[in-house]
Amino acid sequence: MNDARTLFLTTLRMVSLALAFWLPAAHADVYTDVMQTMRSGQLEQAASQADTYLLNTPGDPQMQFLKGLIQRDQGKTDAAIATFTAMTQAFPELPEPYNNLAVLLASQNQIDKAREALELAVRANPDYATAQENLGDLYAKLASLAYVRALQLEPGNAALAPKLALIRQLLTGGAKPNAQPLTSSPSNPSLQAPAPATKP
């Protein structure tokens, strides 16, 4: 079951957020510095930079988002969940924090909470393709779990095995060649709309 869970999680995609268009251009260099430090693997320094910036500008959504990504990369999943949860409360109109929250919750096998977060992401922006894709993947995983349970309850049901095989093929069989793992790095922090992360 752990292998199936791992394969499922690699299909859910984290995104990075480029919210600099909300803020004066003078702040863009701060984000770039934090992201470069993060990309170079100096996560403690990146976290310190983000925290220092947030002391003076606590309501900055882009830096809060970067902080969540840094926490994720540090393996501080609970802290990253707390950061993205706080963002969903402060900025409910942004779908990206809901999406990343969902991926982290799914990594802890909190599937129902992950589904709720993805549904809120889609509600915030119905055209947000990454959240739509992740929601589809999550529903496929839920279908797989339901079919496994049904087979346990009724092992002789010949209709269930092909359905389960089809769902497993979808979850593991290259149906999504461009899927990105949970550890994808942030995209270029340009002054544009939010964009999904690029492959590392």
Image (cartoon, rainbow, N blue to C red):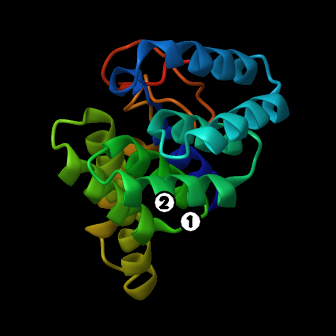
- Could you tell me which residue is drawn at 46 percent across and 42 percent down? 12
Q: Is residue 166 visible?
A: no
Report how far apart the C-alphas of labels 2 and 1 lie in the structure.
Answer: 17 Å
**Secondary-structure class at tag 1:** loop
Q: Label 2: how many residues lie within 10 Å, few (<14), some (14-19) or many (20+)?
A: many
Q: Is residue 59 above or below residue 82?
A: above
> Circle 1 is placed at which residue position?
109
Question: Extreme bottom residue here?
Answer: 153
> Residue lying farthest front?
56
Left or right: 51 with respect to 198? right
- Residue at 37% x, 85% y: name it: 154
Give left or right: position of 24 versus 27: left
Inspect the image, locate mark 1, and give the three-letter code of the amino acid beneath it.
Asn
Dot 2 or dot 1: first in sequence order is 2
Q: Nearer the viewer, residue 127 or 24?
A: 24
Q: Is residue 4 left or right of residue 133?
A: right
Residue 135 rendering spot, x and y as whole percentages: 31, 51
Find disc 2 in the rendering and name its residue: 85
* Residue at left offset 33%, top offset 36%: 130
- Where residue 83 appears, as percent x and y from the top left, is 57, 54
Q: Secondary structure at mark 2?
A: helix
Q: Quadrant of the N terminus?
A: bottom right
